């Protein structure tokens, strides 16, 4: 194992936590969710994901699918 591998894992977890607290979307987590819960749905591109996030955030519709 590389000497800085644990530090990289910790840094990634801290960054993910900060993004979630700030309400920023996590594209990789969303892809994992779609693969597990909605395998029949096509996977969006990263651009489509962020466009949908902005649209959903600033509209008055529902914010969750499940």
Image (cartoon, rainbow, N blue to C red):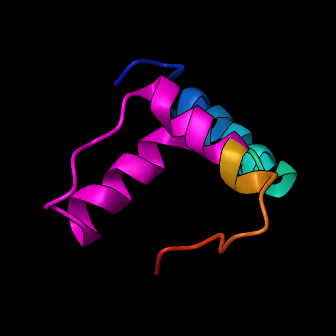
Which residue is at 60% across, 34% downward? 51
Pick whichever, 59 or 31, lies toward us.
59
Instruction: Locate residue 7, reporting x and y percent.
Output: 61, 30
Image coordinates of residue 40 in percent, x first then y, are 13, 61
Q: Is residue 45 left or right of residue 66?
A: left
Q: Is residue 61 visible?
A: yes
56 drawn magenta: no
Q: Nearer the viewer, residue 17 or 23?
A: 23
Residue at (80% x, 46% y) in the render: 18
The quarter in which the N terminus is drawn is top left
Q: Is residue 1 left or right of residue 50?
A: left
Q: How many marks?
A: 0
Position in image of residue 4 (x %, y %): 54, 20
Quick check: can you spot residue 25? Answer: no
The residue that appears at 44% across and 52% down in the rendered structure is 30
* Residue positioned most to the left: 40
User: Residue lying farthest right?
Assistant: 22
Residues rendered magenta in the picture: 25-54
In the rendered view, tell whether residue 9 sits above or below residue 34. Answer: above
Residue 37, picture quadrant: bottom left
Residue found farthest to the bottom: 66
Residue found at x 63% / y 40% = 10
Residue 64: x and y in percent read 58, 73
Q: Is residue 9 above or below residue 16?
A: above
Main secondary structure type of the part rendered in magenta: helix
């Amino acid at each position: 194992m590389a000497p800085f591998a644990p530090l990289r894992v910790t840094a990634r977890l801290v960054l993910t936590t900060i993004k979630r607290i700030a309400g920023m979307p996590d594209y990789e987590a969303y892809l994992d969710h779609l693969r597990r819960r909605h395998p029949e749905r096509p996977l969006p591109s990263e651009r489509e994901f962020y466009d949908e996030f902005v649209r959903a955030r600033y509209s008055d519709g529902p914010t969750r699918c499940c």
